[in-house]
Image (tube, rainbow, N blue to C red):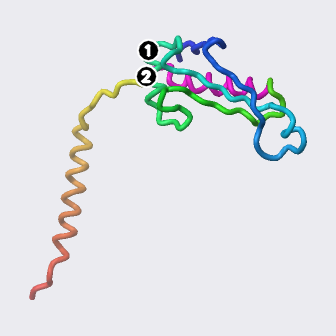
Amino acid sequence: MAVPIEIAESEVEITAIRAQGAGGQNVNKVSSAIHLRFDIPASSLPEGVKERLLALRDSRITQAGVLVLKAQQHRTQDMNRLDAFTRLHELVNSVAEPPKTRRPTKPTYGSRQRRLEGKSQRSETKALRGRVTD
């Protein structure tokens, strides 16, 4: 596997927001959720990685090519920040290595023979289904 790609923190815009859902008074008072925005076209990623990231059919990537992650699973802002960066790195590293190109192959002689044998057996079965004559 290729070397993991590092992303500079200066390329990422982080905003602390209030988390959603249950949590009582803490969730209403503390801005512990993290809203991470990563501009893919303006980043220092290699061009191939940028293209593969933008080609992903992911709802978190906007039309302008900005990846938006929201981390609110943990109770503290630091843990949510770490979670958001971890998810960003996982997504970028998932497309870091280009996919292998498929080289077309021809079917083997044996597989062609088996296919034709199966077709002839099926043909014989269907030929026997005709009307019975005396």
Residues in magenta, as a range: 79-98
- Give the residue displayed 85% in from the left and 33% down from the top: 30
Q: Nearer the viewer, residue 86 or 131?
A: 86
- Dividing the picture into quarters, in which one does residue 108 lie? top left
Determine the secondary structure under disc 2. helix
Q: Position of residue 42 (x, y in %)?
A: 51, 15
**Cα–Cα gap, marks 2 and 1:** 6 Å
**Left or right of 1: which side holds 10?**
right
Q: Position of residue 9 (x, y in %)?
A: 66, 13
**Left or right of 105: which side holds 22?**
right
Q: Nearer the viewer, residue 106 or 88?
A: 88
Is 38 one of the magenta-colored residues? no
**Left or right of 17: which side holds 104?**
left
In the image, what residue type sits under mark 2? Answer: Glu
Asked if the residues shown at circle 2 and circle 1 are in contact, with their CB atoms under 8 angstroms apart, the answer is yes
Determine the secondary structure under disc 1. helix
Name the residue carrying label 2: 51
- Give the residue displayed 22% in from the left and 44% down from the top: 112
Q: Main secondary structure of the magenta part?
A: helix
**Left or right of 3: which side holds 55?**
left
